[in-house]
Image (cartoon, coloured by chain):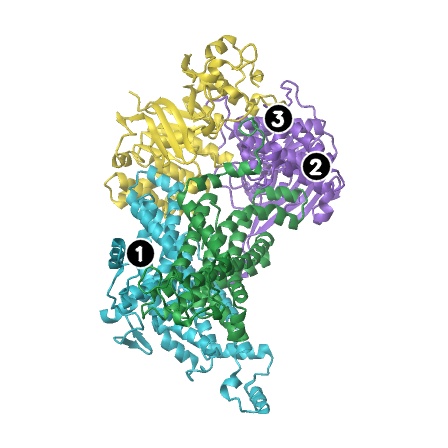
């Protein structure tokens, strides 16, 4: 009759190729640059054991005499250590690669946990409404008013006090995923709930109910797929936030120990040497952290502009 | 000289996917005190036309050509300041949805008085008196109380009356009303429409009424303009268009109304749907849906497919159709054949 | 109005109840006061007697009620480290944090509104794009890193040469970033003015005010971009609304449309978000105070965690909770007063 | 180009029987307005009292839908017509009253017990832009109900049934692999009708199915619904505010105001001789093509809120014929011949 009937239906690839998402990516050089940097950083971090010249976790590979050597472009550098060494004599480049790996693993792990908790709670609250909704949302409100960072610090402090410093350091990755995941689920829950409420009032959900479909089918087969774009958009922001939160916790001494450094604990360990002029120990991992978070945030901004989902405000 | 003279207006929207032409070669005139209806289906460009008259088209839309002469001045070329002096003062506007049109955080009085103060050197007390007076004219009960109320405290019908009162505040020459009753209930619609009609007649205000409702047009306006896919396809005296439309689309639109078929029988439908503005077909935009554009062999006529039809004068009407002459000869047309 | 107040108070009470339960649970599980009170040498039987005497063997609920009763009188016990009532310790540190938060809030309010509004009115202008770019970078830099960089630049001074000096651009860049430093960066300084009680202020003179600059700027660096982006986004949305178009159609001047019609509607959601963000600000003081050795509650809290000073941790939680609850209630009240569509009966009309 | 079957001259010959398919008795629906306990607190004369407020959406409605007819329910927004439709379909549960389907009570059934009725009664919605799941293809949308209700059917049989339904509503089979957003409003409404027809129902509730469409598309969809009624012997409960459509489409009409039924009559009777003052006002307000000037009956005042329902006749505040009794006493529906009923004291007393 009009636009849709003339040609055969497109394939999935053609659909993606013609999609607005792909179109705007092609026409947005910032998004392209960010995407390339992001892919390079993630792959370099994941391939750290193969790329790095030394394993910073293994102190037998480290020569303490080589400590505080500057990067290659400054006098006094050593060709073995292109970005210099830290106070323990570890190669900065290798340490940063490993550190970025830890930061990314914690960031993604924490976001997966947040999403699992948050999406489940958000779906339940939005679809069931009533007391479940009131309870979960009030919980989320209280937690948010306390601010996620504060909650993470408190939970971290409690964990540390419960398990003791040594055990805490040993399982730091897992614990940090748990801490950040528990602290930040309300963001997901509120976003998902808001879009579930918006979707639930649409008539296709009524149509499904009139068909007699059961609540579970309606929730997961009909409503959930339609809340994916806001989930996707806040996921980018949340990964950036989780990486920053991890860095903050490590900086406060509630995160990764210096022996298995993340970007945050690298910054912390270098902080003490700032006065003595060894700026690279702090500022190089700092720069890597900022670039990583920045490209994720810029990609998130781009996604939000393209998908334009109704996000929960406030 | 006509009060308002719109000629060859061309409005485009520069969207990321490409340029969309929302209005093409739209021309019409409006005399003092005249009531003109612009009808069309959603997406025909009639709202764009309404906003263009006040040069209120916002980015990414822009006026690409044509002129709007009001009292000898071209509104498309005026400086923002001069336009501001005309808006709400000599030409005012009524919007579609009264629930969205008034600012929720300002009182009715503030929104009325600011309009007076923007155009006249006037003291607040005087402005308040004028506002009260206008509220009385639109039959608002206890107007003193209303002035200090916020919009959300009033019903939709009441808000639309207040918007009409604002439109009338400075005794304008023209009111542009964009679907002023679409968002309202049937009984309220009738009330608002008759109020608008009464006030326009009383104050000799010209009215441009944009609507999709042929019934409203037939009752309120003297002249009608039918739009399809961004173009004017037919214009003339309302009575003649309603009773004896010339363009196949206008005919189809009128014949598709339930009241034109006997109860229980099938309605006279136009096949297909109006193309989106970005995908307007070449030639006459209506030709893929038109029941007359085929020749004896059942093929689409070449001129309908390729050439944009020029206006042909038929009686008091101007019609943009290649086949007007033939159709007039073939009269009377059986509407059922149109599909 | 009174029903609204009662409702808000009830909410506040509820939140405080939840916080107190959590705080108590932490205290109950982590703090072993006996350990702290007596040494390792005391035999188990004596410890048990002491436990019984202190009521530590009572059921959870009984202990909680005792805790809550004491909490009502602001009695949270003694700090292990300071050997003083925890409330006294907190009160000594509270003014420093509050002053830091106040200075930061001032910075945010003064800068975010004009920048956000400007970026919304002229979204394509070069300056607006610059602001948006800077704010995206701003939210991507962790607060402690900002603090470190600020200290390096303004306090220590950039005396080292990070770029290779042999090349022309290297020495140019080195010159560009080199600073002398010299700004005070650690602590509150010695020029404080006594106000009353434990309150000494940095606000009374330039010599002390300068100590506030770096901590406040770095604390603002995380919140300011968020507010600029929020105000810009809200304002852009409002400018698209029908009522703004109608105001234009009425012939109202653009200045009045921007600063009355649009701004008033923009600020409504910003107020709500602002209330929540004050909480976040207090949380971030922990980071800034640590970097700047600012003697506020945040630094005290972190030290308390290091020292496992459980009563002090619990008191801190309760006090911070109270601050959040009070600010949120105030913000709700202000929102209700500003927004005419909220009748202060509790439900939007 | 898709064409529906068209017989412009022959009037639809749908056999209306006297058998009542759906029987609605004493239906009431109240929505609690105030949220939790705290939001119900109010100050009255210096005392804090708890007051729960309700929206009285439906206040005692009796409607019979006869097999084979197209019963239209008209009224202005807030009159409760959509609420009635949603309660019939089990999307809302009534506060009071009974709904019977073919003699069986269905208003209190569990979702599982309702399942057999889901195949017999279906619904068409107002907004074609929201009634299709954006993440499902048209084929999936149409197959899902069949697979759900006929788990024993083979894939082939389901596909065949879908193809048949698509053909009957004029959907190109090529559309199947596409998503809803690729179609225009009229096309989407066709797909939504196909979804309802897929399970082969006998009764369809249509909630303002053409209100969101343009005039030329409205005619297409109405024709399609009339075709389907004829070929499938459907019964319609048709909710609308558009009286012109009612006049054309309806067998009988129910006029509602503020949650009550004012008048029930055959379409022709109602349009030629409206009895209830509200019906008269409503009919006079339709903008007609023919006459030059509207001669409509001006109603005074505003529609009251359904929160504080007026005493007596809900229409008395705006009725030109209201008297003391109307303000006091709720009018009952009285038969006025030809199966028509009017709830009006003035008619009963012969004042009107």
Q: Report the side of C187 relative to D208 (left or right).
A: left
Q: Position of residue C328 (x, y in %)?
A: 43, 63
Q: Say which of marks 3 and 2 sits in front.
A: 2
- Chain D colour is purple
Distance of label 1 from label 3 (alpha carbons): 62 Å
Q: Are dots 2 and 1 on a single chain?
A: no
**Would residue C345 be seen by someone viewing this image from the given angle?**
yes
Towards the viewer: D315 or B105: B105
Residue under label 1, please give it: C111
Q: Which chain is green?
A: A
Q: Secondary structure at mark 2?
A: loop
Q: Which chain is yellow?
A: B
Q: Report the side of B240 relative to D254 (left or right).
A: left
Towards the viewer: A75 or C248: A75
- Chain C colour is cyan
Task: Return the chain for callout 2.
Answer: D
Q: Which mark is residue D199?
A: 2
Residue under label 3, please give it: D223
A283 over B338 or under it: above or below: below
Task: Return the chain for callout 1.
Answer: C
């Amino acid at each position: 009759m009009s636009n849709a009937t003339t040609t055969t239906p497109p394939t999935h690839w053609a659909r993606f190729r013609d999609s607005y998402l792909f179109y705007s990516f092609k026409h947005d050089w910032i998004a392209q640059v960010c995407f390339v940097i992001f892919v390079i950083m993630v792959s370099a971090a994941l391939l750290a054991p193969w790329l790095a010249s030394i394993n910073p976790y293994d102190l037998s590979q480290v020569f303490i005499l080589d400590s505080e050597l500057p990067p290659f472009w400054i006098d006094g550098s050593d060709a073995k250590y292109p970005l210099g060494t830290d106070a323990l004599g570890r190669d900065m480049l290798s340490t940063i690669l490993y550190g970025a790996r830890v930061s990314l693993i914690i960031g993604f792990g924490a976001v997966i946990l947040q999403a699992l908790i948050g999406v489940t709670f958000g779906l339940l609250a939005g679809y069931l409404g009533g007391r479940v909704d009131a309870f979960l949302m009030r919980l989320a409100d209280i937690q948010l008013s306390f601010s996620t960072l504060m909650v993470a610090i408190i939970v971290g402090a409690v964990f540390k006090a419960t398990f003791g410093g040594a055990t805490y350091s040993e399982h730091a990755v897992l614990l940090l995923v748990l801490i950040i995941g528990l602290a930040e689920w309300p963001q997901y829950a509120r976003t998902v709930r808001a879009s579930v409420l918006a979707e639930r009032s649409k008539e296709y959900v009524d149509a499904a109910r009139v068909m007699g479909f059961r609540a579970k089918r309606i929730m997961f087969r009909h409503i959930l797929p339609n809340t994916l774009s806001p989930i996707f958009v806040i996921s980018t922001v949340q990964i950036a936030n989780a990486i920053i939160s991890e860095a903050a916790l490590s900086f406060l001494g509630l995160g990764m120990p210096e022996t298995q450094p993340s970007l945050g604990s690298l910054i912390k360990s270098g902080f003490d040497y700032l006065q003595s002029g060894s700026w690279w120990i702090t500022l190089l991992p700092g720069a890597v952290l900022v670039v990583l978070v920045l490209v994720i945030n810029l990609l998130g901004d781009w996604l939000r502009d393209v998908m334009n989902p109704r996000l929960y405000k406030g | 000289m006509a009060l308002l003279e719109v000629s060859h207006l061309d409005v485009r929207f520069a969207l990321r996917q490409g340029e969309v032409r929302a209005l093409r070669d739209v021309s019409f005139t409006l005399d003092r005190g005249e009531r003109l209806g612009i009808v069309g289906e959603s997406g025909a460009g009639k709202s764009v036309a309404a906003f263009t008259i006040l040069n209120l088209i916002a980015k990414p839309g822009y006026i690409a050509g044509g002129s709007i002469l009001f009292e000898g001045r071209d509104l498309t070329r005026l400086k923002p300041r001069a336009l501001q002096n005309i808006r709400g003062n000599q030409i005012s506007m009524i919007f579609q949805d009264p629930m969205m049109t008034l600012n929720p955080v300002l009182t009715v009085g503030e929104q009325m008085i600011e309009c007076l103060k923007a155009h006249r050197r006037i003291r607040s007390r005087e402005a308040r008196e004028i506002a009260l007076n206008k509220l009385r004219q639109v039959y608002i009960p206890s107007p003193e109380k209303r002035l200090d109320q916020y919009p959300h405290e009033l019903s939709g019908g009441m808000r639309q009356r207040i918007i009409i009162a604002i439109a009338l505040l400075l005794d304008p020459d023209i009111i542009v009303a964009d679907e002023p009753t679409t968002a309202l209930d049937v009984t309220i619609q009738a009330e608002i429409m008759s109020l608008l009609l009464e006030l326009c007649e009383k104050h000799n205000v010209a009215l441009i009424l944009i609507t999709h409702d042929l019934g409203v047009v037939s009752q309120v306006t003297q002249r009608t303009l039918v739009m399809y896919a961004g173009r004017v396809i037919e214009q003339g005296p309302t009575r003649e268009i309603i009773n004896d439309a010339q363009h196949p689309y206008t005919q189809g639109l009128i014949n598709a109304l339930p009241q034109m078929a006997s109860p229980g029988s099938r309605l006279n439908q136009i096949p297909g749907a109006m193309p989106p503005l970005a995908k307007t077909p070449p030639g006459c935009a209506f030709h893929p849906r038109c029941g007359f554009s085929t020749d004896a062999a059942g093929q689409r006529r070449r001129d309908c497919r390729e050439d944009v039809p020029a206006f042909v004068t038929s009686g008091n009407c101007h019609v943009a159709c290649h086949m007007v002459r033939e159709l007039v000869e073939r009269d009377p047309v059986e509407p059922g054949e149109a599909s | 109005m009174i029903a609204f107040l009662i409702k808000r108070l009830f909410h506040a009470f509820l939140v405080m109840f939840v916080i107190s339960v959590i705080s108590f649970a932490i205290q109950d599980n982590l703090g072993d006061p006996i350990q702290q009170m007596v040494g390792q040498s005391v035999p188990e039987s004596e410890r048990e007697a002491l436990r019984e005497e202190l009521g530590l063997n009572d059921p959870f609920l009984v202990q909680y009620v005792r805790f809550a009763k004491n909490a009502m009188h602001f009695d949270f016990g003694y700090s292990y480290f300071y050997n003083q009532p925890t409330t006294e310790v907190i009160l000594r540190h509270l003014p420093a944090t509050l002053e830091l938060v106040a200075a930061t809030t001032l910075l945010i309010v003064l800068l975010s509104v004009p920048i956000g509004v400007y970026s919304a009115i002229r979204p394509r202008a070069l300056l607006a794009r610059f602001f948006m770019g800077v704010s995206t970078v701003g939210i991507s830099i962790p607060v402690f890193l900002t603090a470190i960089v600020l200290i390096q630049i303004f306090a220590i001074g950039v005396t080292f040469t990070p770029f290779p000096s042999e090349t022309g651009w290297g020495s140019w860049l080195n010159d560009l970033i080199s600073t002398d430093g010299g700004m005070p960066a650690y602590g509150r300084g010695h020029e404080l003015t006594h106000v009353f009680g434990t309150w000494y202020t940095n606000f009374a003179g330039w010599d002390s005010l300068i100590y506030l600059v770096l901590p406040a700027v770095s604390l603002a660096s995380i919140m300011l971009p968020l507010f600029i982006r929020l105000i810009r986004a809200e304002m852009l949305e409002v400018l698209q609304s029908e009522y703004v178009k109608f105001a234009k159609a009425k012939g109202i001047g653009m200045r009045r449309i921007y600063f009355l019609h649009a701004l008033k509607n923009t600020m409504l959601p910003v107020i709500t978000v602002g209330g929540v963000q004050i909480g976040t600000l207090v949380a971030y003081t922990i980071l800034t105070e640590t970097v700047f050795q600012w003697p506020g509650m945040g630094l005290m809290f972190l030290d308390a965690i290091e020292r496992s000073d459980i009563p002090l941790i619990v008191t801190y939680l309760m006090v911070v909770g109270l601050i959040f609850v009070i600010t949120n209630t105030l913000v709700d009240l202000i929102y209700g007063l500003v927004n005419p569509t909220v009748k202060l009966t509790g439900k939007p009309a | 180009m898709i064409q529906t079957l068209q017989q412009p001259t022959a009037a639809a010959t749908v056999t209306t029987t006297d058998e009542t398919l759906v029987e609605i008795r004493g239906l009431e629906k109240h929505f609690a307005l105030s949220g939790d306990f705290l939001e119900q607190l109010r100050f009255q004369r210096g005392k804090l009292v708890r007051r729960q407020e309700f929206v009285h959406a439906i206040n005692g409605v009796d409607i019979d839908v006869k097999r084979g007819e197209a019963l239209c329910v008209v009224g202005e927004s807030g009159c409760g017509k959509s609420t009635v439709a949603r309660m019939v379909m089990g999307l809302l549960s009534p506060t009071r009253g009974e709904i019977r389907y073919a003699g069986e009570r269905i208003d209190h059934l569990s979702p599982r017990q309702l399942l057999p009725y889901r195949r017999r009664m279906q619904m068409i919605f107002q907004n074609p832009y929201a009634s299709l799941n954006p993440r499902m293809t048209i084929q999936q949308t149409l197959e899902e109900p069949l697979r759900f209700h006929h788990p024993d059917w083979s894939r082939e049989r389901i596909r065949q049934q879908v193809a048949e339904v698509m053909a009957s509503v004029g959907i190109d089979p090529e559309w199947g692999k596409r998503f809803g957003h690729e179609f225009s409003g009229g096309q989407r409404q066709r797909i939504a009708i196909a979804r309802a027809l897929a399970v082969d129902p006998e009764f369809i509730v249509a909630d303002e199915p053409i209100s969101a469409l343009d005039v030329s598309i409205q005619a297409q969809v109405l024709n399609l619904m009339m075709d389907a009624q004829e070929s499938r012997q459907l019964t319609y409960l048709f909710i609308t505010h558009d009286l012109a459509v009612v006049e054309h489409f309806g067998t009988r009409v129910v006029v509602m105001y503020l949650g009550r039924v004012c008048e029930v009559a055959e379409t022709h009777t109602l349009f030629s001789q409206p009895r209830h003052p509200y019906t008269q006002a409503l009919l006079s307000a339709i903008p007609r093509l023919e006459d030059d000037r509207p001669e409509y009956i001006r109603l005074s005042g505003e529609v009251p809120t359904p929160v504080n329902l007026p005493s007596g006749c809900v229409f008395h505040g705006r009725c030109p014929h209201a008297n003391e009794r109307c303000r006091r006493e709720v009018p009952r529906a009285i038969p006025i011949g030809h199966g028509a009923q009017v709830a009006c004291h003035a008619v009963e007393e012969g004042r009107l």
